[in-house]
Image (spheres, grey):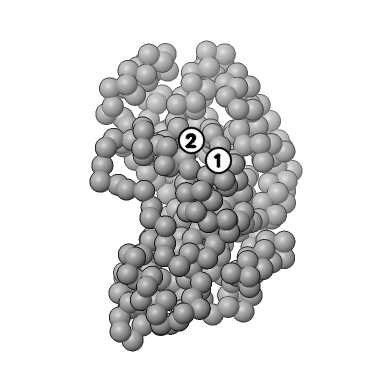
Amino acid sequence: MNLNVAFWANGMQQNIAFLHDLLNRAGYDCEYISIEHPQKNTNIEDKYTTIGDLMAADGTALDVLIIAGFDLLPDMYDKLKMRNPNLKVILIHYGNKMMDDIHFAICAPDSKRSPLVKPRHLSQVWMSPQHEYGLEYIKSYYDCENVHITPFLWEPKFMQDKMRKLGRKGFSPTYDKKRANRLMVFEPNISHLKNCILPLVISEKFNSMYPNEIDGISLFCTQNIEKKHYYKSFVNRLSISKIPNFIRSTGRWASLDALSKFGCTVLSHQYGNDLNYAYLEALYLGLPLIHNSPRLSDVGYYYDDFNVSLAANQIKNSLINHEYTLTKYIEDGREFVKQYDPSLPQNSQPYIDLLNNA
C-alpha cells in the first residue's frame, strides 16, 4: 500500500487497514509494507516498513506475507523465502480479478498493462464474497485449489475521522433536505461493472415522469470518459443534457467532501459487485441510497437489476418520505452495517483459521 494515501481515500486502503487491525487484535505482530515512507505530516501510529527497507540485506524475516495493494518482483519472493523457508504467501483479491481480465483484454485501450503473474511460493488466495462467482476462474488462473472466500470487513472509524475534519471547517456530509434534490453518482467509470450510464438513464426517466423535481445529477470520476465521442453523443441525446447545469461532470472526489458540498442523494448502479463501501457509508450517514445491490435490498431504496422505472420511482419515494423516516432509516442502516464489523467473531475467526492452516 501507499501510506501517503489517506485510509479513507479508497476502498483498497480501507480493506488493508481493517484486515491489519483484525489480525493485530488476534495477537499477530503485523506491519504495513508501504511503497514509500509516509510524509512527515502523515499520522501513522502502526508499525510499517517500506518495500526498500524490507528487501535490504538486514530486512525482516517474515512468517506470512499478505499481498493486496501491489505485487512484488519474482526475485523478491525468493529472497524472502530464503530468509524464512516456512514463509507463507497469501494473495488477496479485493477487486474483481476475473472481470478486470476481461475488461483489460477486450474493452480497455491498449497499454503496457499485463496480467498479474502468479506470486512465487503462493500458499492461499483470498477473495471477497461479492466476487464468489469468479472462484473457479481464480483457481484455474493461479493453478491453485487453495482459494477461499473471506468475510467482507467495514467499520466507520475512517469515515468518522474525516467527518470530524469536515466539521471543523463547517461542513457535514449527513442528510440535509436542502441538498437532497441533487443526485450524486460516484461510480468509477472504469468498466461496465460500475459506471454512470444507468444513473444517467434513470435521471432521464425521473425527469420525464416528474419534471423539475430535482436540481440535477453530479457525475464524479468522468475525467477519462467525458471526451470520448460515443459518451458525448450518448449524453447529448438525453433531454436532461439540454437543461442548463442539470448534468455536472467532474473528476474523482473524496465522497464525503462532495456530499458535504453538492448533494446528499446517492444514486448507484452495479453489475456483479454488490458490496461496496460507498453503500455502507451512505447508510451509516442516513443518506438516501438508490441502489440495485441484492445484498442490501432490505435497506436504502432498492431497485432490481436494470429496472430504470423502479429506480426513478425510488428517487421520488426518497424525496417524499426520507425526512420523515430519517431516524428509523439511520437506525436500520447502522444496524445493517454492523454485520461487517471486523471485531465480530464471525468475521475475524475465518481469517485466523485460514492463517493457522496456511
- Residue 306 lies in quadrant: top right
Name the residue that disc number 1 marks.
273
Could you tell whether 131 is left or right of 239 in the image? right
**Frontmost residue, 31 versus 56:** 56
Name the residue that disc number 2 marks.
193
What residue is shown at x 38% (from left), y 52% (from top)? 116
Q: Secondary structure at mark 1?
A: loop
**Frontmost residue, 145 versus 345:** 145
Q: Are marks 2 and 1 in contact (CB under 8 Å)?
A: yes
What residue is shown at x 51% (from left), y 48% (from top)? 140
Q: Where residue 194 appears, x then y in whole percent?
A: 48, 36
Could you tell whether 39 is left or right of 256 in the image? left
Q: CA distance from mark 2 to mark 1?
A: 7 Å
Could you tell me the amino acid type at mark 2? Leu
Q: Secondary structure at mark 2?
A: loop
Closer to the chain start, of discs 2 and 1, is 2
**Frontmost residue, 225 versus 78:** 78
Tell me if residue 66 comes above or below residue 107 in the rendering: below
